[in-house]
Amino acid sequence: MSIYFKHMAIIGVGLIGGSLSRVCKEKNLTGKITGFGRNESNLKKGVELGVIDSYSLDLKDAVRDADIVLLATPVRAMVDIVKMMIPHLKGGTIVTDVGSVKGYLVDKIEELLPKDISFVGGHPIAGTERSGVESSFLTLFKDSNCILTPTEKTNGEALKKIEELWHTAGAKVILMDAKDHDRILAAISHLPHLVAYALVNTIGDIDEDDNLLSLAGGGFKDFTRIASSDPVMWRDICLLNKDNLLEIISQFQGSIERLKRYIKKEKGTKLEDEFNKANRIRNSNNLMC
Ligand code: NAP
């Protein structure tokens, strides 16, 4: 199936929106791409870099005549943006998103959109700790997974087009229930980010002379790279996936408590068992760098 959109509007031209825009331009999937955001210098940069064709600081102008609208802002901004743009969308438009939390967004956006506008929830499992259009790049989604979360309300044609869009970007598409997505991502993505932020702050708090971290080696840098991720984006993800995140944080606290107990009681074999178990899980899931 070959896809072509006459006019794509990208709401939030940052790392993810900008990278998908680059794919659409490179593969000639679109006639024109209009960017929308709050910060004109980022959008101007997007035009200069050839990531988008033009931009507007006015949402209604950005989405007017669009046959596809990509929501790529932090997740808590998306519902208000949808509310504001609905009166200006034409019938037949596809709205899709790249948000890292799906349950709340899919429910809310499906509830808001009129019947002749399709919504397909999406989440590319690809990214870096960097933000803004200057960090975007063409191959970000190559060989990655992209989760789409259709419901019984999802228009089949729209779903096929969004699947094709992500295939063209180089991603393998996985269809999943939005609630399952949020439970799984809380464990494999949201918890690790939280732990990285907490670890850096723990060391920062004891680093009175501000020079402890200058001694940090590769392990610390590998582990904490994601603590450089955008705070607003991660604030939004944590609050929108609160219940799943609280549950997995409790399980994690249990694992830390167990390690603490083994260390306190000098249970070397138990500690070794824990570390061997982690080695086995990581190695058998092809997670070696
Ligand atoms: P980003 O680089 O910071 O880009 C977000 C863009 O949204 C910015 O260009 C920002 O531009 C715009 N924006 C922010 N708040 C806005 C608002 N209230 N109204 C309009 N525009 C707004 O972030 P990103 O990494 O591309 O993330 C975008 C989305 O993708 C998020 O929902 C995130 O959960 C999801 N995601 C991220 C990753 C990742 O690893 N980074 C991976 C998968 C999915 P202005 O400041 O000019 O408004």
Image (spheres, rainbow, N blue to C red):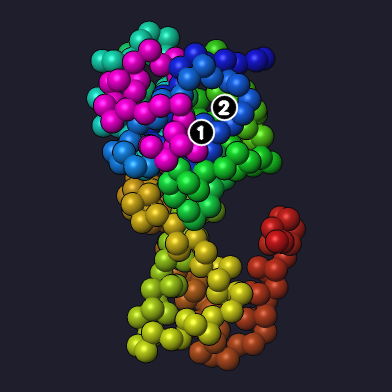
Q: Amino acid at mark 1?
A: Gly
**Residue at the spot x=48%, y=53% of the render?**
130
Q: Is residue 233 magenta?
A: no
Q: Is residue 216 above or below residue 159?
A: below
- Per the image, label 2 sits on a secondary structure element best described as helix
Q: Position of residue 49 (x, y in %)?
A: 50, 38
**Residue at the spot x=70%, y=68% of the render?**
279
**Residue at the spot x=61%, y=74% of the render?**
218
Give the camera-side residue of 28 and 50: 50
Q: Magenta residues, as a range?
A: 43-68
Looking at the image, is mark 2 or mark 1 earlier in the sequence? 2
**Disc 2 to disc 1, C-alpha distance:** 9 Å
Task: List the residue tagged with mark 2.
Answer: 25
Q: Give the number of the disc on residue 50.
A: 1
Q: Amino acid at mark 2?
A: Lys
Q: Give the number of the disc on residue 14.
A: none
Residue 289 lies left or right of residue 232; in this view the side is right
Q: Is residue 77 above or below residue 200?
A: above
Residue 273 lies left or right of residue 243; in this view the side is right
**Label 1 neighbour load within 10 Å: few <14, some 14-19, many 20+:** some
Q: Is residue 259 above or below residue 160?
A: below
Total numbered circles: 2
Q: Position of residue 214 (x, y in %)?
A: 49, 82
Contact between marks 2 and 1 (CB within 8 A): the answer is yes
Q: Position of residue 38 (x, y in %)?
A: 29, 38
